[in-house]
Image (cartoon, rainbow, N blue to C red):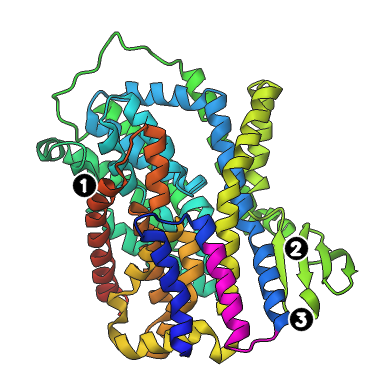
Amino acid sequence: MSLFLSIFPIVLLIWLMVKKNSMPSYIALPLVAALIYVIKIAYFGDDFMLLNATAASGLVSTLTPITVIFGAIMFNRMMETTGCIDIIRKWLANISPNPVAQLMIIGWAFAFMIEGASGFGTPAAIAAPILMSLGFNPLRVAVFTLVMNSVPVSFGAVGTPTWFGFAPLNLSAADILDIGRQTGIMHFFAGFIIPVIGLGFIVSKEEIRKNIGFIYISVLSCTLPYVALAMVNEEFPSLVAGAIGLMVSVFAADKGWGLSKDYAKDPEAEKVPLLQVAKALAPLGMLIGMLVVTRIKQLGLKGLLTSSEPWFGFSLPGLSDITVTQSLTIVFGQIFGEAVSEKYQTLYVPAWIPFVLTVWICIVLYRTKFKDAWSFYVATVHQTNKPLLALMGALIMVKLMMVGGDDSMVKIIGKEFAAMAGDNWVYFSPYLGAIGAFFSGSNTVSNLTFGPIQQQIATDTGLSATLILALQSVGGAMGNMVCINNIIAVCTVLNVHNAEGTIIKKTVIPMTIYGVIAVIVAAIFFM
């Protein structure tokens, strides 16, 4: 009965998300979290106040991802409102009339960089309209952008799926780095195959063959720095590698390297002045610059932004002891009198710095009207409502499932899964991560939800925990292709109706292949 009641909420959650009239994650996740709360009291007999304190810590921990999402969405809306995206689109369209070049620059390299900066499904939503405006079929564009938005995802939103997605597991910094390293290598090898499959949904095999040289210039210009950065850092791989890949791809396309000669540049095409292009790219430059200076320890800012030296504190009797550090980190201790604590690193979480700060600077730089700035702020608030509910539900659910030590729901599930799969679990691990991304809409939420289970299975089978968690992270990334939330988002921006089922049937093929690649790489290099 313990096993059944531990598994049932997850099975119910998956069913709610995949049934014919599916329930959105922002309803399903809080609902299942509430069910787990009831089961923990009624059957497992956990302490009432301990569960309440754990749920409250889940609410506090939600501040980290939701503020990152808020900042990322507001940044992208600012780029649209100020016309930066429009200028970038015209500039990229003039680089090369070759459709493969345009697809790789915008749908691969540009989206790679945007994923690194913002994540949360925004790359497909931004890249897809640009590609459609260049004349590509909307339905094919939807499939293409979803497939391409996979390789960079594990380090999307400044590495949130990795450094925050596995945060509840209390891993050491060395373990997180090891997970990132293995994740990057698996994605690197997938990069040789997945982009080509993605292109196959939108152009002919003959077009791919003729332009294969450029395709791999573009791919490797992203994946080589990506895997190199993943060796030393879990925040920058997608962001910096995407920026490098975009510059190299644009330069190579302009020179015609690896491209067929079937397409000639139009001498009468509208030219975008270099000054306008530089001004349009300035926000992205600021974003990357701020991230770099606040993340490199030697520059000293990281220490200031993460200082744990208390500044002041106070107590809310019966609720929590609150401490504010010199870095404005807010620590909630002894929640409801229990040995439960949680914190929010206000200045270090990549939300206010750099996203919101960059937006404020750009409002002044581009002389944005107050009503326009207010409109994208309001729109951002509305857009984060549902992700907030989904993340709250996910984080409370995960934290409640971890209550109970060796008798926690997570450990019960892990022991049984380990007994059934044994050493063979490595072959199934990425697909569990993909299921998590499918129903939650996020690699981060997938890691939060299934990371504890994967860790427990690794412990019980004697497999490498960092390897299994790396496969989980890769699975969460490849699951982006079939994530219903992302599919609905990209269909909405492209005005494609009733095509969700068709898209899933197409994207599930490269997703399955991705998992096979990950397992093969894991078996060759890490086992």
- Crowding near the residue tagged with mark 3, few <14, some 14–19, many ≥20 C-alpha atoms within 10 Å: some
Query: Which mark identifies residue 295?
Result: none
Q: Disc 1 to disc 3, how far (Cα)?
A: 53 Å
Above or below — where is 2 with respect to 210? below
Q: Main secondary structure of the magenta part?
A: helix
Above or below — where is 141 with respect to 262? below
For label 1, the SS is helix
* Quadrant of residue 331 within the rendered picture: bottom right
**Amino acid at pointer 3:** Glu
Per the image, the residue denoted by label 3 is 338
Query: Can you give x and y, in whole percent of width and height, for residue 497 in the image?
Result: 33, 36
Q: Which residues are magenta?
A: 29-47
Query: Which mark identifies residue 196?
Result: 1
For label 2, the SS is loop
Is residue 476 inside the magenta stretch? no
* Quadrant of residue 229 within the rendered picture: bottom left
Query: Can you give x and y, in whole percent of width and height, for residue 255 in the image?
Result: 27, 27
State the quadrant of the C terminus: bottom left
Tell me if residue 244 can be seen: no
Q: Disc 2 to disc 3, how far (Cα)?
A: 25 Å
- Residue found farthest to the top: 268
Query: Which mark identifies residue 307?
Result: 2
Question: Which is nearer the eye, 468 or 20?
Answer: 20
Q: Earlier in the sequence, mark 1 or mark 2?
A: 1
- The residue lying at 38 percent from left, 58 percent from top is 477
